Image (cartoon, helix red, strand yellow):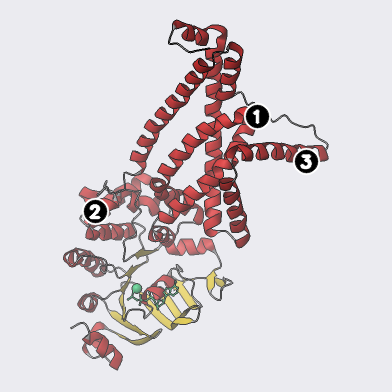
């Protein structure tokens, strides 16, 4: 079907509930992206600290993790983590005599994407921590701060201006990567769009609408991340 | 009253023996200047006092509290109790050559950070005290400014206010004016001089010989990892016992 900017396409979106289904899909995409980004941040902070001050074994394991994630295509990784992870967990559950669990939930999507995000976050945060002048961390120690307090009060907030550009980028990638989950059927935006388009045969209308939704989400994100950056860099002299 | 006592501090980096047994006792109100050539171990000694550097050997006592050490697995000693170390560090304020103010905090936030988060002082009380200290070092107007927007002299005075905020038993200065433009040195020395005059206990690593002569009551000349000459400034500067010290002092004229 050839798309024309007629009232027909609007009708297609409003009638038959496809439009609202897509909004639900969008919400699901954003939830998964947000969760994956947050999980990635946690993994990233831990990974960066492990790489910077962990033992030899931890450092090698983390190097392997970031190298693998960065070299294998995301889609392949997602399939590996999803199926291997599900097999592993269900294998353990079966061994323990427990019932298998269904992984078709947002949680699975979050974990799968979060593991991928974590590798990139690790590198972004590691670089940012290295940009914090060592003297500031020494000053924290010299004033009697514990390692945890130093991390929370000094290292993490001081590295934020250096990490934010990379992290904003990762957030955009997280949002777009949720589309890859369509192959697994998480009910996110791209999968819903494919269903809608397949059923109505109005491919262009629905994929165009989906594209607009992703674009809108990105634009809002950019607005927010610019604000966040302005706030985080208030201590940075712009000369 | 003894505030800080270090006995036979040794420190090696790999094969490099930087300190070979340096001792020092600071009683309340003492201002002790450490002088010596570049690489003589002045900074290393100062950093051993609050264990930023793990000493290889020796004893350290702060206000009667002897730091308990254990081997750190790299041939040096580390504090056996982190709690004790933190307690001691919190009261041995350090002022660095490169200021090291925390860049994501305003001046006032820098000053109240350790009191609030390390010593557990009530925030409002810490703010009142912090403002008073900033007033004292002439930076009240800059209280809400971030360090990057301050001159070196202002940053260092801010760092001194941050050090004063923990009500230190002793203050450790590592060349506090070496990173400053010449025209900014005076404002920082003025603050340090006032602290000396009000009876603060201070250990001061410095290349400002005339200042050391003016403010200190004890001068230690480090060379080759040992205290080569020590005594009241009039003696050390006026009548150096060691040939090397005489030559070292001569290089400043
Ligand atoms: N972390 C370190 N690892 C290896 N060697 C070090 C380390 N820190 C200091 N040294 C060495 O120890 C010696 C003493 O250094 P230190 O910084 O204590 O000298 P200093 O007296 O403070 O000199 P300056 O007047 O230049 O500041 C130098 O030879 C230095 O290279
Ligand atoms: Mg030095």
Do the residues marked 3 and 1 share a common chain? yes
Spatial separation of the CA atoms under disc 3 and disc 1:
22 Å
Disc with the residue nearer the chain's start (3 vs 1):
3
The residue mark sitting in front, 3 or 1, is 1
Q: Is residue A192 left or right of residue A228?
A: right
Using the rendered view, name the quadrant where residue B155 is placed.
bottom left
Spatial separation of the CA atoms under disc 1 and disc 2:
55 Å
Quarter occupied by the N terminus of chain B: bottom left
Which residue is the site of mark 1? A184
Image quarter for ligand 2: bottom left
Which chain's residue wears label 3?
Answer: A
Name the residue: 58% across, 15% down: A196
Q: Mark 2 touching mark 3, by CB under 8 A?
A: no
The residue mark sitting in front, 2 or 3, is 3
Viewer-proximal residue among A229 and A80: A80
Q: Secondary structure at mark 2?
A: loop
Residue B244, position as x, y percentages in the image: 30, 90
Residue B90, position as x, y percentages in the image: 42, 60
**In the image, the residue with mark 2 has its CB under 8 Å from the nearest atom of ligand 2:** no
Which residue is the site of mark 2? B150
Mark 2 burial class by Cα count in 10 Å: few <14, some 14-19, many 20+: some
Residue extending farthest left: B183
Viewer-proximal residue among A156 and A22: A22
Using the rendered view, name the quadrant where residue B4 is placed.
bottom left
């Amino acid at each position: 079907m050839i798309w024309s900017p007629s009232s027909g396409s609007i009708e297609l979106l409003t009638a038959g509930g496809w439009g609202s289904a897509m909004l639900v899909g969008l919400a699901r995409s954003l939830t998964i992206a947000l969760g994956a980004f947050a999980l990635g941040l946690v993994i990233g902070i831990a990974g960066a600290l492990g790489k910077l001050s962990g033992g030899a074994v931890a450092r090698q394991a983390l190097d392997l993790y970031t190298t693998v994630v960065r070299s294998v295509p995301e889609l392949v990784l997602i399939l590996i983590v999803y199926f291997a992870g599900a097999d592993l967990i269900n294998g353990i559950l079966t061994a323990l005599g427990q019932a298998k669990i269904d992984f078709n939930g947002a949680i699975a999507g979050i974990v799968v994407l979060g593991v991928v995000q974590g590798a990139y976050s690790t590198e972004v945060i590691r670089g940012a921590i290295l940009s914090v002048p060592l003297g500031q961390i020494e000053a924290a120690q010299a004033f009697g701060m514990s390692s945890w307090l130093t991390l929370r009060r000094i290292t993490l907030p001081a590295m934020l201006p250096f990490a934010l550009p990379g992290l904003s980028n990762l957030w955009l990638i997280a949002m777009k990567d949720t589309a890859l989950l369509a192959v697994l059927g998480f009910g996110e935006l791209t999968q819903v769009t494919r269903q809608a388009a397949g059923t109505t045969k109005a491919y262009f209308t629905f994929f165009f609408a989906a594209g607009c939704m992703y674009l809108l989400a990105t634009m809002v994100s950019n607005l927010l991340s610019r604000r966040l950056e302005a706030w985080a860099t208030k201590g940075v002299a712009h000369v | 009253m003894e505030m800080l006592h270090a006995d036979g501090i040794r420190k090696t980096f790999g094969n490099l023996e930087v300190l070979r047994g340096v001792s020092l006792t600071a009683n309340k109100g003492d201002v002790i200047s450490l002088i010596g050539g570049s690489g003589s171990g002045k900074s290393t000694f100062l950093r051993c006092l609050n264990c930023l550097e793990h000493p290889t050997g020796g004893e350290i006592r702060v206000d009667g509290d002897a730091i308990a050490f254990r081997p750190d697995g790299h041939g040096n000693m580390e504090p056996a109790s982190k709690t004790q170390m933190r307690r001691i560090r919190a009261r041995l304020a350090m002022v660095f050559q490169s200021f090291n103010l925390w860049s994501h905090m305003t001046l006032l936030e820098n000053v109240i950070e350790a009191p609030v988060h390390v010593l557990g002082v009530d925030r409002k009380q810490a703010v009142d005290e912090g403002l008073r200290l900033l007033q004292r070092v002439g930076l009240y107007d800059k209280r809400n400014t971030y360090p990057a927007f301050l001159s070196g002299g202002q940053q260092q005075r801010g760092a001194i206010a941050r050090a004063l905020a923990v009500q230190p038993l002793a203050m450790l200065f590592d060349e506090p004016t070496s990173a400053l433009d010449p025209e900014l040195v005076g404002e920082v020395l003025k603050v340090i001089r006032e602290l000396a005059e009000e009876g603060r206990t201070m250990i001061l690593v410095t290349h400002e010989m005339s200042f050391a002569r003016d403010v200190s009551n004890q001068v230690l000349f480090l060379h080759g990892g040992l205290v080569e000459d020590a005594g009241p400034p009039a003696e050390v500067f006026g009548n150096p016992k060691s040939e090397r010290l005489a030559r070292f002092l001569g290089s400043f004229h």
